[in-house]
Image: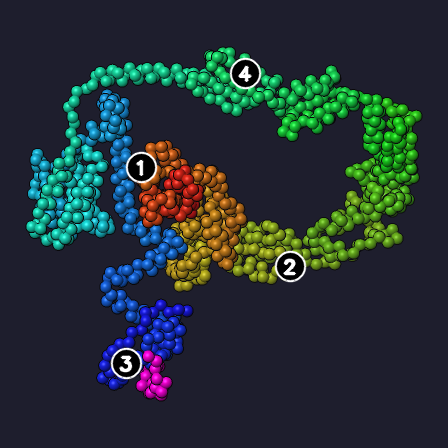
Amino acid sequence: MTSTVDPISLPQRTASNDTEIDREALARLLVEIARNVDPDYRVRLDGVPSADPRMETLRQLLVSREISELSRVTHLLDEPEQLAAAVGDVLPSAAARAPHAQLGEALAPAVERAVQRSIQKSPRTLTDILYPVFLPAIRKSIGEKIDQTFQSLNETLRHIFTWHGLKWRLESWRTGASFSEVVLKHSLLYHVEHVFLINRTSGLLIAHVAADNATSEDPQLISSMLSAIQDFVKDSFNEKEQSGLDTIRFGDLRLWSEVGPFATLVSVIRGNPPEGLHDIVRDVLLRVHEDYSQALREFDGDGSQLAGIEAQLQACVELKQEESNQGFPWLVLGLGLLLLVLAGGWFFLSWQSGQRWQAYVSRLESQPGIIVAEQKIRDGQFYIAGLRDPLAVDPQVLLSGTQVDPGRVHSQWQFYQSLEPEFVLKRLTASLAPPESVRLAIVEGRIVAEGEAPDTWIDRARAAARQLSAGGPVFDISRVRDVSPEAREAEHWQAYVSRLESQPGIIVAEQKISDGQFYIAGLRDPLAVDPQALLSGTQVDPGRVHSQWQSYQSLEPEFVLKRLTASLAPPASVRLAIVEGRIVAEGEAPDTWIDRARAAARQLSAGGPVFDISRVRDVSPEARAAEHWQAYVSRLETQPGLIVAEQTIRDGQFYIAGLRDPLAVDPQALLSGTQVDPGRVHSQWQSYQSLEPEFVLKRLTASLYPLKSVRLSIVDSRIVAEGEAPDTWIARARAAARQLSVGGPEFDISKVRDVSPEALEAEHWQYYVSRLESQSGIIVAQQTVRGGQFYISGLRDPLAADPQALLSGTQVDPARVHSKWQFFQSLDPTFVVKRLTASLSPPKSVQLSIIQGRILVVGEAPAAWINRAQAAAEQLSADGVVLDVSQLRELNLAELNYLREAIQTTDIFFSSGKVVPGPEQLPVLDRLADQIKEFAQNARRSGVAARFMLTGHSDATGRETANASISAARAETVRALLNKRGVAPELLLVRGAGTFEPLVPENSQAGSSTNRRVSITVNLD
């Protein structure tokens, strides 16, 4: 590496006082070191004498400290972090001591490269830095330009249809000026009466100039009042320091304020001044600051250094616009009206002719087989060209009745074959020549052939269907029946085969037609119908039919029924029938027949129908006696207080044993009507006390002797006592309830009311406690009655009912109630729903409800709200509360997406160097404002918030900083224009992208004009 350090010069200085070292010798030694370190220095220092080799020892003695320092410096240079720290320690003081010009020249290239790299890496950083500086000035400039534009537009629209407007339009035509300029010249009448130049810092009046006919109070007083008003507004509304008073209007009087670095220029104007007057006043203020900058900065009330400043302010006072008194040009008006009438007549005739031509063109376009490719009107002639099917109507014929001169019509038609179904139908009819038995028609865009035809015509029709163009209509010939003899015979044979296949007991395994003969084979049950008999009526020649049938036993229920009937020979009292695919036997039969039927049921094939003989009754005497005995035993088992432990039939005798409650019915009495001989019945019953409720009720009634005010009854297998009784009887009843055997019915005396005074108070208190316990959000932890006072404590949700309010109507004295409640958050779904509603703020399209203890959320919501609801559901699941959000659907934003696409595809374009769009963009702004307002309203209705980012762009012409500023200014202009059209300002965000987001490459003038735009991006929250 070659060093770029300047050659070393040898300083000639005396030895230092502290070390007495010869500096010249030291310099020679350093030169020697430099020669050894860097070869480049060897060449540069050829003229310098070399060090004496004998001085090596002396060098170590004399310059050892310098060598160590040099080593430290070399190490410092080799370590970038330590070198950066060392340079950082001395850099601020070195920069402060360096001359500004030299420092600027030295740092300029490095700073420029650093800024250039920073901009290339992150353009937005420079935009963010310049944004606070340029934005206020850009906003003010844009605001004035917009006000000037709207002022011109308003004045023009106000006078456009008036006599003055007509006069001014003629003047515009005569002078060559634009109509808006003439309107502003005559309608914006004003004159400047006063000009005040006020110091920004102290509010002192620097200079004041008034018009000749102007009247006012003390100028210094007016200056002080204006400064006070400005300070009041800043302090009251926290306005920024650099902002200032802009405009004050009082009747026909206006105060315009222009703020400069050191002074504010206030103009008092009477009338309606144009917005362009701001530029004139601002130029005067700029010239004042250029000429008197130092004096304005140091102004303390002494105006001696500001001589001549009033002469410059006098230029503002002389500004005015007055109405001229010229006479009205009646001749010009007459000529203008005549020209207007002539032009109107010509325009009407041209419009009428164009309307007739368009009616003719629309008539052509509606005709099938005609395609209009091009049509235009040029020099009073009509030109039309396109495609026409030869079968379509003649365009010349359609001219009649349109009042279009045929001599002025020039047409050029190319022939083509239309694929319209009516034209394809005509060509098929002409080429196929269908017989009279075939009808061709158009059905739902398809050409359908129906009827009968020979196979030769059908083959031609199939070929024509395949040859139709891919985009043409479908030619359906499936409904044409082939009437050739072979086809008829095959049709009759298939009808016979289908008839066979529908017969039970016949299975067709194979069938074919070969050499005019019919062959068929399969399986046939001997009980099935004869296939030969089915040939009658089929028009199939039996002599040409060759059949081969194998016999088999069908498992069809009807065939199995026939075989069972033949083999079992059922008696007349038994009926066999088929019920839901099963063979069912019903009636009465002896046991011998029943045994044969059971054997036949077991022998049926596994895949056959079920043979059910459960409904056949055995009519033998032993079976009848056993049946009567079982009926008697079943009757005993249903009786309460009787338990049948064992019963048998042996040697014609009936034996039964078990348990019987003395209060139960007598088993001997139940024998009557059972057709069982009592002499053959042998019974053995053991007495016991039944726990059946009715028997326990009888015993309790006999032992307790209940009062008339107490009623005992059986409710849901429990013995319930209801009514009023003294505490002595209630104590006996409680003792009886405890003595009841385990497994017996419950004896419930909770409904017996104790009529003693203490019991009534305790009853009222328990009623109040029960009322509290039934309330959601209240948990009673402890409650007691002590010393005639009532004590209660527990937990209460702040959203729950007030326990004190629940005391009303309970007959409990509130003064004797002592309560202590701790607050808690209940997990009751009702309270959870209230808290969720307060925290999540669900949109109107979402409904929260409680179903079977679960909180169900149903409806449509934005994805962000659904995520919040799912997070809440996860938190609640840890507490055991189910928040079901499975039925939440993400909000269907189809309509919003359609509007969003329409907004985001809209761009506002600008002329080169302009920050205000041209008049041709005003309809686009109107439509865009309506779409943004509609989108914002629909978004609010759907529960989402919409924001619109306006991004300004510029072409690549000019400097990048200027392009960044103009792009931000364009975005601010569009925001201001949309705001004037009713779009809320808080919906609009702006940013300037400069040249960094081009829409198209800038390789032409069209590309540059396309990139000068403001684009819109829609964001949903």
Q: Is residue 489 above or below residue 933?
A: above
> In the drawing, what numbered circle is on residue 664?
none
| Residue 408, x across and y down, in percent | 47, 14
Q: Earlier in the sequence, mark 4 or mark 2?
A: 4
Q: Nearer the viewer, mark 3 or mark 1?
A: 3
Q: Which mark is residue 24?
A: 3
For the residues labelled 3 and 1, the Cα–Cα distance comes to 84 Å
Residue for badge 1: 980
* Amino acid on which the number 3 mark rests in the picture: Glu
Q: Which residue is nearer to you in this view: 665 or 305?
A: 305
Q: Which residue lies at the image location 26% right of the left edge and 46% below the top edge? A: 137
Q: Which residue is mark 2?
A: 743
Q: Nearer the viewer, residue 283 or 628?
A: 283
Q: Nearer the viewer, mark 4 or mark 3?
A: 3
- Secondary structure of the residue carrying numbered label 4: helix
Q: Residues within 10 Å of mark 2 (few under 14, many from 20)?
A: few
Look at label 1 and name its amino acid: Lys
